[in-house]
Image (cartoon, helix red, strand yellow):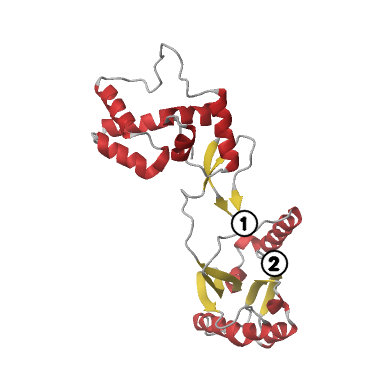
Amino acid sequence: MELERRDFRAMMVYDFMRKISMEQSHDNLVEAFQDQAPSKRTVERWYLDFRRERTSLQDEARSGRPSTAVTPETIAAAETLIKEDSRINYEQFAETLMIGKAAINTILHDYLGVRRLAVRWIPHYLSEMQLEARVEWCKFMLKKFKGGESKRVYDILTCDETWIYRYDPETKQQSLLWVFPAEDLPVKFRRARSVGKKMVAAFFCKTGPLTIIPLEDRRTVNADWYINNCLPKAFEPWSSRRPKTDIRGLLLHHDNASAHTAAKTLDFLAENSASWYCIHLTVQI
């Protein structure tokens, strides 16, 4: 979220009206907005203005010559810095350009029109064809189960395998990027390099999570592990919830990974009177 100076002043006057001290108001702003927050001196100046019963949050008209910090040269230099490193922060701008924070704000927002946004992580990049296939699958499932009103939705057991990564995650503040007006919102498709990982199979149904089964001492899922270890362990808690029917009538919903579509997997499900819905939309990361 990119805020303007007027927005910060509104927060300051709110704190002032609530009898919050100038020091606490500044601390709150720094905690919430880090290097975007106004300086302590700025907060102190506005508190003094509020005590003098100032009501306008707009900048007052100034006389005299304009600031020499905002020049075509500093504007071009700031633009170059962003293009070289879109994660650059205010302190680095000030150190490189040797200008104040107010001038930096003016250059970034009034002249370059950039915004500072957090990178949004999405699990996969999908083509138009893959997106359309997902829409068609959702329409099929809605029709099959009457928009979720069919009682058969309680017979669906969904399974998916995923890697659980161990790594030091990037904080939201660290992921902030400067984005020019014509640029798309920043996203990332891959996780940071991890220091370790473990494969797990997660099962859940209409009423919530059922069980999570780790893939012990293996690097990949195969049909033998799926039918001899994974599915039996998943069927146990399912059967305990439904002792009268056991897994008869179960609708197993998983993707088209080779372990799920292997002949021995289909035979295993048939022998246990379980049906399956295979969504053919596997995407490799």
Image coordinates of residue 235 in percent, x first then y, are 56, 82
Marks 1 and 2 close (CB-CB < 8 Å): no
Q: Is residue 7 left or right of residue 158?
A: left
Res 8 → quadrant: top left
Secondary structure beneath label 2: loop
Q: Position of residue 237 (x, y in %)?
A: 51, 81
Amino acid at the residue labelled 1: Phe
Number of numbered discs present? 2
Compared to 207, does 188 lie above or below?
above
Marking on residue 158:
none
* Percent of width and height locating residue 13: 32, 29
Q: From the image, which quarter does the C terminus lie in? A: bottom right
> Considering only vertical position in the picture, is 75 above or below 167?
above
Which SS class for mark 1? Answer: loop
Q: Is residue 112 visible?
A: no
Q: Earlier in the sequence, mark 1 or mark 2?
A: 1
Q: Name the residue under label 1.
A: 189
Q: What residue type is labelled 2?
A: Thr
Determine the residue positioned at 60% across, 40% down: 83
**Residue lying at the far top of the rendered structure:** 63
Asked if 175 appears above or below 65 in the picture, the reply is below
| Residue that badge 2 annotates | 282
Q: Where is residue 195 in the image (x, y as percent from the top left)?
A: 51, 69
